[in-house]
Amino acid sequence: MREASRLRNELRRRLEDLRLPEELTAAIVLALAEILSNIIKHSAPSAGFLGVRLELIGAHLRLETSDDGGSFQSFVDRLSSVSMHETSIMSETGRGLFLINDSLDRFSYEGGPVNRFTGWKSIISSRPLVLIVEDDDTLLDLYAHYLRDFRTVKARSCEDALMVVRDLDVSVIVADLHLGDGLSTSLLQSTKDDFGPLVPFVLVSGTDDVSVPRQALAGGVELFLSKPVSGSQLRASVDLAITRTTSRDARVASAFARDLDGLLLGKLPSFICGRDVVVARGNADAGGGDLIYEHSYQARRRIILLDVMGHGVSAKAWAIAYSALCRGLCYASPSDNCAEFLKRLSEVVWNESAMDSVVATAIVVDLFEDGLVEIASAGHPSPMVISKTRSSQVPVSGPLLGVIAPSIYELASLRLLKDERLVLVTDGVDSGDVSVGGVLPEWLVSGCAEEDLFRLSGRELEIVAGTNLGAKPKDDWTVIVIGAARGGTREH
């Protein structure tokens, strides 16, 4: 157990070198602690060594443990099913597996002779965060268990709850009316006064006073629940509160975006440096942070595709900030290549305290008149070279903007063959695999290879994307397709 403790502490130290939310660091460390505990307690024969590897790949952390003990062939099956048992979190049996399941987005296990457990965790979670405020510990744990499909954080008083709202981006507050330090309805005005827009509030109470629900709803409470509360009732109420808030945010974001889409997603010319260019894109209901910027230099043209993680008005606002930074840096440092530009941008973001909680990926492409293409990436989905008969990723990577201290970025260069196209995307086209280094989905590869793509200005690609992503995608998505320079031959 001493070795497990050392590994856990070392992992926390490495995570603290990154600019990540404390809740994310805590989740990864907790997952590791439970995984190592299972290896030590249940391996037969016992493990002779333990290994831990942590990687930041795009916007995901990849945690891998290795050991030479007896393997658990049914480990992932047990891990995947444990959350379905209503009693698992309330008992010691299965509790560790539940915590691993709850701390990671997905996982896999490969048995011996060296056993490997691999877990993935997005640094930007798509799951809403629910703050549960209850001074009865049994009910606090029970409500957290009911809401296990969400991210949850617990508080036992109004004071503790305000500290959570100050530090974390809370989606919904579920609170008992009577707490040890007063009525939880005081949180409504406090959060509005201190933190801006009202966080949707689900109030729970055992009162028999029929005037209390009416007064609470009139005072800004989203929903009122009478005790006792069932799991299905609580989950449905949180879902409804989120849906209502998302709809309100979507209306604000849409109005906001109408005036700003020209700034964030301006139309690229259809012909740049002897190459055909087309853009296809789609918007999520609540908006997002995709940004396209094109800059002209004397001997080359630069295209920047950037994705601010998140949704709604906040993502749009930070995309505007990034747009201003990109424009300024392009003018201020015209001799920088793509990699030097990203390093300079990373330095600005890292040293600007206002951007501590903002995470973005970016890819920068320089197109030269002689057919040369240079590319640098900051944690962005890999670009691909696609033709009618083949497709391949361009091997270029680099750290996310705003997450680690500025470092050197790779610079890739190539020349496209006559029938090839360079494809740039944001991860909204396939957030499951593309964002962690996977190839583009087949429907997109086929669409980008279509002979009439440029003639149709990407409209057919948008139709195909709508069929596969739905009329209301979960995230904004952008695809930029760049053709070969006329008469070009490819060289890496």
Image: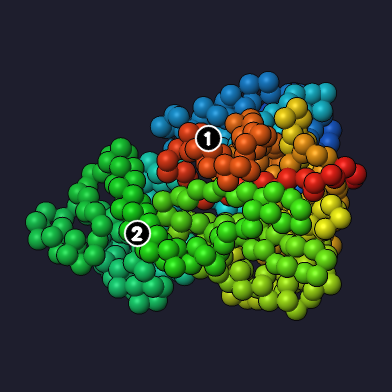
**Looking at the image, which residue is at 84% across and 44% down?**
487
**Residue mark closest to the camera, 1 vs 2:** 1
Residue type indicated by callout 1: Val
User: Given the current orientation, which residue lies at the most extreme right position?
Assistant: 491
**Looking at the image, which residue is at 69% across and 28% down?**
109
Residue type indicated by callout 2: Arg
Residue 54 in the image: state x and y as whole percent: 75, 47
Residue 174 in the image: state x and y as whole percent: 33, 55
**Residue 339 visible somewhere in the drawing:** yes
Identify whether 299 is placed above or below 242: below
User: Given the current orientation, which residue lies at the most extreme top position?
Assistant: 73
Residue in the foreground of this view, choosing between 129 and 471: 471
Residue 317 in the image: state x and y as whole percent: 51, 68
Query: What separation in Å lies between label 1 and label 2 (alpha carbons)?
Result: 26 Å
**Looking at the image, which residue is at 34% across and 67% down?**
198
**Residue 361 visible somewhere in the drawing:** no
Q: Could you tell me which quadrant the C terminus lies in?
A: top right
